[in-house]
Structure formats: structure tokens, C-alpha cells
Amino acid sequence: MKTNRIVIAGILAASTFIAGCAAPGYPQASSPYPAPAGQQGAYASYGVVDSIQVVNTGAPGGIGAGAVVGGLVGGLLGNQVGGGTGRGLATAAGVVGGAVVGNQVEQRSHQGGTAYQIGVRLDNGGYQTYTQESVGDLNIGNRVRIDNGRVYRY
């Protein structure tokens, strides 16, 4: 019974650590010149495309939280099987199997793709960067309209 408490405490500690490592999402727009008070999102801006950069939004490579949590759960379940040397082997197999399954689940849930950061030199002299999933027919030097955080050719 004491072993189960240690395993459960380890799972709680690992999940607390993993939750603290969560990364925030991509910012949608940034500007040193905020929109006038009371008009944020209520008007369209105009400018010229200054840069277009490809951003990978897929899952990062390597071992992630899914593998760690899967390994912990697999180890806990494997520890419930057998006795003596068999229990140790079942625990080890549970850790490895759980880590593999957890990693696969994490990779499938983070199937991302490509996003584009579009830098726009605004007519008012400001500069904004927008992240969106496609550029359509935008090219550097195109005249654009920014409406509700999206860049459109003008």
C-alpha cells in the first residue's frame, strides 16, 4: 500500500510540473501604436507588406508531456500485475508501453502545419505583425487592408 502512495505522489508531482511548462499561443498582432481608444477593431488599417515568414505550428520533436504521463500511468498499471520479479518486469513494460502510447497520442493531438507571419508597414508609419494560416495571393510590396486582425490584398 505504501508503494501505491509513492507512485500516486510521483504522478501528482509530474503532472504539476508538466502543467507549469505550458506555453502560451502565438500572438495575433503586435504594434507599438495601439488603435485609438474606442475604435479598437472597429476600423480597417492600410499599408504595404514588408515581410512574410513561414512559422511551423506543428508539435515540437522529442519527448513531451504525453510520453511522461503515459509512462507514469503505464508504470502504475504494470505495478498492479503479478508479484516479485514479475511485478518489476510488468512495471517496466508498463512504463515503456505507456510512454510510447502517450507520445503517439500527443503527436496526433498536435498535428499542426504552417502559419505565416506577415509584417505590414502601415500608412500611419507604424509596423504590425500578423500571424495567419494562409497568405493567399499576398506578396512583399503588395498594398493591403487589415480588417479584424487579418491581412487582405487591397
Image (cartoon, helix red, strand yellow):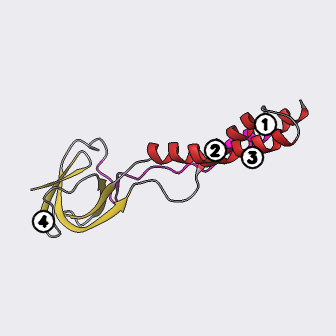
Q: Which of 64/20 is in front? A: 64
Q: Which residue is mark 3?
A: 92
Q: Residues within 10 Å of mark 1 (few under 14, many from 20)?
A: many
Task: Say whether disc 1 or disc 3 marks the residue closer to the N-terminus.
Answer: 1
Q: Tell me the residue at 44%/47% (across/down).
A: 110
User: Counting residues from the N terminus, which is met first, the one under dot 2 or under dot 1?
Assistant: 1
The amino acid at mark 4 is: Asn
Left or right, residue 48 beside residue 9: left
Mark 3 neighbour class, 10 Å CA radius: few under 14, some 14 to 19, many 20 or more: some
In this image, 64 relative to 60: left or right? right
**Residue 103 x %, y %:** 55, 48
Circles 1 and 3, Cβ within 8 Å, touching? The answer is no
Would you say residue 50 is visible in this rendering?
yes
Say whether residue 121 is magenta.
no
Q: What is the CA distance from the residue labelled 2 to the residue labelled 4?
A: 52 Å
Comparing labels 3 and 4, the label whose residue is closer to the camera: 3
Residue that label 1 marks: 79
Where, quadrant-wise, is the C terminus in this rendering?
bottom left
Q: What residue sits right under mark 4 in the picture?
A: 142
- Whether residue 150 sits left or right of residue 79 in the image: it is left
Instruction: Say above or below: 27 vs 119.
Output: above
- Per the image, label 4 sits on a secondary structure element best described as loop
Rounded to the nearest angstrom, the CA distance separating label 2 from label 3 is 9 Å
User: Which residue is at a point 84% across and 33% down the rendered structure image?
Assistant: 5
Q: Quadrant of the N terminus?
A: top right
> CA separation, marks 1 and 3?
8 Å
